[in-house]
Image (cartoon, rainbow, N blue to C red):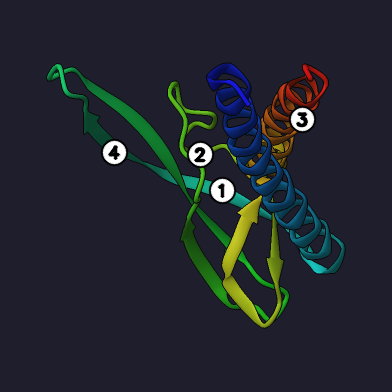
Amino acid sequence: MNQDTKFFRIFGSIFGGVGSILTITGIIIGLNTRSFVTSAIPAHGTVMDLVKSSSTDKKGRTSYVYYPVVKFTARSGESTIFQARTATNPPEFTKGQQVEILYNPQKPDSAIINSWLSLWFLPAMLTGLGSIFALVGGIVLVKSFSRF
């Protein structure tokens, strides 16, 4: 086996393996999200604040994202405030904006804003990128075996 063939087999295996892991992770997160959405209770909330978070890259440039803080009343009558796990720049929501949220009645503080970005972006991104990586790795791997 020559060096090129060995390189392509290693490259294809690593690329395909990482892609498979990302794809499976995306599918699992998507299934968990679907399970949550089907069992969650919808409610209306109000964006009370936007929490600004910053990060600085290696070149010293600072970027900001905004996490919405939402207040809603659960069916039990309990008022709950939570900070969303998804941040954006520019802010996806504005202070005072009404939003639909989904929550588990046993854990109202684990509420999520009912938006595609909050619910489906991560599983879609992982599944999509993972599938592309797995496909590229698989093609490279198959081609490396057909070079005999």
Residue 12 horizontal/vertical position (percent): 65, 30
Q: In terms of sequence position, does the residue under pointer 4 or pointer 1 come before the other?
A: 1
Q: In terms of sequence position, does the residue under pointer 2 or pointer 4 come before the other?
A: 4
Q: Is residue 107 above or below residue 114?
A: below
Task: Give the labeled residue for mark 1.
Answer: 46
Task: Give the labeled residue for mark 4.
Answer: 53
Mark linked to residue 138: 3
Q: Give the SS element for disc 2.
A: loop
Task: Give the labeled residue for mark 2.
Answer: 96
User: Which marked residue is nearer to the observer: mark 4 or mark 1?
Assistant: 4
* Callout 2 amino acid: Gly
Label 4 – label 1 distance at C-alpha: 20 Å
Label 2 – label 4 distance at C-alpha: 20 Å
Q: Give the SS element for disc 4.
A: strand
User: Which marked residue is nearer to the observer: mark 2 or mark 4?
Assistant: 4
Q: Give the SS element for disc 1.
A: strand
